[in-house]
Image: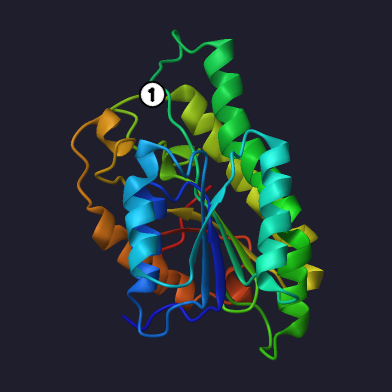
Amino acid sequence: MEGLNTRTVLVTGSNRGIGLEIVKQLVGQGNRPACIFATCRDPEGPGAQELRNLAAKHQGIEIIPLDTCKLPTIKAAAARVTEKLNGAGLNLLINNAGILKLSTVESETEENMAQVYKTNVIGPMLVSQAFLPLLRKAAQESPQKGMSCGKAAIVNMSSECGSITNLFAWEFDQVISYRCSKTALNMLTRCQSQGFAKDEILCITFHPGWLQTDMGNQLGPPPLTLECSVRGVLKTLAGLSEKDNGAFVNWEGKNLPW
């Protein structure tokens, strides 16, 4: 797969699910990135064994601890990536880490709402802020015109569950805190697209589909495999430009209603 042409990528939540599959497919590209920063909360734990095995087989994968709910780990990760890049910038930031709590309008709790919002909205905001200097550097030093994921971009993994218009998969589960968090993440992305437009940093919010993952399986039988989704995600990312800045798109490249 040739697909996405970018030199440096950072993926949060890369020890499983979508994040891990993104790293797998990136290293399988003919024009694979020179540096893939794969972050997760516990790189040494049993949950990251598959990621560690992947890094052992492929050069250029740097596993870095980063908990999106803990600012000190975000700052430490940004410092480490800055050191590893040795003066270069970061082309692509994929805010993928997220959580889901099953709930209904009647059963949703203050604790769950706060935890899910902190992970799914505040986390991507803080990570984007921490890596903004590296994204700006990549954009400033790129010979490319306009915007692209090969130049400088923030990709926020959202969900059609956050679409107020579609209210996707309501019949399977209400997941109130998850839906509200993804709607808020969509707004954050729109704000980022405006705030960072002058820096020519592309900002996009993404629905990867209802997937056969630990998270997706909680809602019922998902129709889409990880491999198929991520293949579509990377193909779509490869074709994005300034006309897509601030858009809400799915793994097939189709625009979704807010």
Residue 167 occupies quadrant: top left
Asked if residue 191 lies left or right of residue 186, the reply is right
Which residue is rendered at x = 42% and y = 85% of the image?
Answer: 31
Please name the residue that numbered disc 1 is placed on: 174
Q: Above or below — where is 206 with respect to 136?
A: above
What scheme was used to colour the molecule? rainbow
**Total numbered labels placed on residues in the image:** 1
Residue 227 position within the rendered picture, expressed as x and y whole percent measured from the top left: 25, 60
Residue 119 on image: x %, y %: 57, 34
Q: Please give the name of the residue rendered at 47% of the width and 41% of the height, measured from the top-left corner.
A: 165
> 10 Å neighbourhood of mark 1: few (<14), some, or many (≥20)?
many
In the rendering, at what x and y percent does residue 33 appear? 49, 77
Vertical side of 210 occupied by 229: above or below: below
One can see residue 192 in this view: no
Q: Is residue 228 visible?
A: yes
Q: Residue furthest bottom?
A: 143
Give amino acid for label 1. Gln
Q: Examine the image and state in which quarter residue 122 appears.
A: top right
Residue at x 60%, y 74% (from the top left corner)? 243
Q: Residue furthest top?
A: 106
Q: Is residue 115 above or below residue 205?
A: above
Residue drawn at 56 percent across, 61 percent down: 10
Q: On the rendered structure, is 6 left or right of 174?
A: right
Q: Position of residue 161 (x, y in %)?
A: 43, 38
Q: Is residue 185 left or right of residue 213?
A: right
Relative vertical location of residue 45 with respect to residue 203 in this rendering, above or below = above
Question: Is the N terminus in the top left, top right, bottom left or bottom right quadrant?
Answer: bottom left
Q: Is residue 170 left or right of residue 92?
A: left
As helix, strand or loop, the secondary structure at mark 1 comes to loop
